[in-house]
Image (spheres, rainbow, N blue to C red):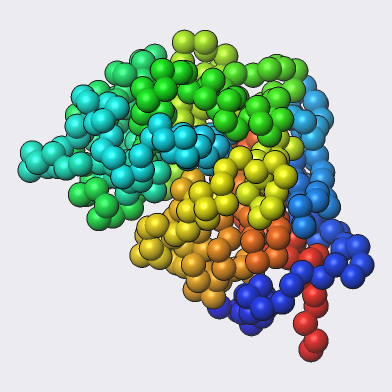
Amino acid sequence: MSKPLLMAAALAAAVPLADAQPPSFAALDAAIDRAIAQQRIVGAVVLVAHGGQVVYRRAAGLADREQRRPMREDAIFRLSSVTKPMVSAAALRLVEQGRLDLQAPVTRWLPDFRPQMPDGSMPVITLHQLLTHTAGLSYGLLEPADGPYRRAGISDGLDDAGITLEENLRRIAGVPLAYPPGQGWRYSVALDVLGAVMEAATGSDLSLLLRQHVTGPLHMPDTGFRVVDGARLATPYQDAQDGGAEPQRMAPQAQVPFGEGRIRFAPDRVWDAGAYPSGGAGMVGTAPDFMQFLLSLRPGAMSRLLKPETVALMLRDHAGVQAQTQGPGWGFGYGWSVLVDPALAGTPQGKGTIQWGGVYGHSWFVDPVHDLAVLAFTNTAIEGMSGAFAQDVRDAVYAALLPVAAP
């Protein structure tokens, strides 16, 4: 690890953020401008909150490059996995109400959902394991073209497979588990399964449950499973390929390289009233709305959705650092990765930071040590989620808000 990064990690563990004078976010502006000028992203909305108050907000670049439509702060984005934290919170609200039980088997609500191990045994899968991605399930987007989920025609919730949630569950249950539940970690379609559990337990549609338990109480009018204002919907792009100089506008059926696999995007899925509400990837929303959600997690937040002990449970690492959910030093809680060892991770973020993103081009984190929430929504996959842009935003925020160490 470099000396500056070691110093930043040490400061994150021991020094409060400076608030004696207004911080300069020149480095953050420069990071955003650089990413747009280098044509790594097309547009972005970046928000930074410190002490529960938004201290930086900026919409930059274009929401639609071909139409020269500027990005705006209230632009609506396809959220992809930014959906997961909100669905997780709604599930935990149902737990508080006694309508769900984290340690109960999924078959209590979905009696036909019985995936098997390769040897034919049929282990129990609990809601806790769905929430933590320790259930033995997988994602087609993580697999090569001939992977088992791809062969079974399983939807990741991002495509337009043209199947019902019930049919997708049947296909998921027909593929052998990747490992015994509770004995591994793998990012997966588990939140889609959880969404089906929530619907079965309540008799309500998942979109209604999210309005009742998350977006309604937090006054998030633009966030849900359907677009409320098409004029504000950001056009999605994918990283430049085959030597191209700029991100490509996503086709109606797009495939974007991702690790060993390819993510299958169908941007028009958001307009399909027949598409099932994917608990793992199906929502749309704005950056200000999601910041409302992140700020509701703060201790003493006036708009708290959940009991303090429930929030603490969500913020706890349940997977262990061996899961390396964001690399070394990261575990996983309910809805997001949890930073267990900042030095091992090589990050200036404080211990207990939660972080995740979305493959349409989003990243976010909440650092409880420094009472800091940062999100960057872009319309460019995959750079906006896991490219240099997300790290540049993170580092620029800490450069603005951490006191400068004496030489």
Residue 129 x, y percent position in the rendering: 33, 46
- Residue at 80 percent across and 51 percent down: it is 53
Name of the residue lying farthest toward the front: 98
Q: Which is nearer the eye, 8 or 71?
A: 8
- Quarter occupied by residue 14: bottom right
Q: How many marks?
A: 0
Looking at the picture, how far across and down is residue 327, in whole percent? Answer: 46, 62
Q: Position of residue 322 (x, y in %)?
A: 36, 65
Q: Is residue 237 left or right of residue 115?
A: right
- Report x, y in % for residue 200: 36, 22
Residue visible at 82% across and 70% down in the picture: 18
Image quadrant containing the N terminus: bottom right
Indicate left or right for 295 with 334 as reference: right
In the foreground, 193 or 92: 92
At a point 39% along the width and 48% down the height, the residue shown is 132
Q: Which quadrant of the figure has residue 292?
A: top right
Q: Is residue 133 left or right of residue 277?
A: left
Say which of 399 and 251 sits in front.
399
Vertical position of residue 275 compared to residue 105: above or below: above
Residue 187 visible in the shown view: no
- Asked if one can make out residue 210 in the rendered structure from this viewpoint, the answer is yes
Q: On the image, which quarter does residue 28 sit in? A: bottom right
Horizontally, residue 72 falls left or right of residue 370, namely right
Observer-nearest of 30 and 232? 232
The residue most toward the right is: 21
Report the residue at 80% width, 49% height from top: 54
Q: Quadrant of the C terminus?
A: bottom right
User: In the image, is residue 398 above or below residue 313?
Assistant: below
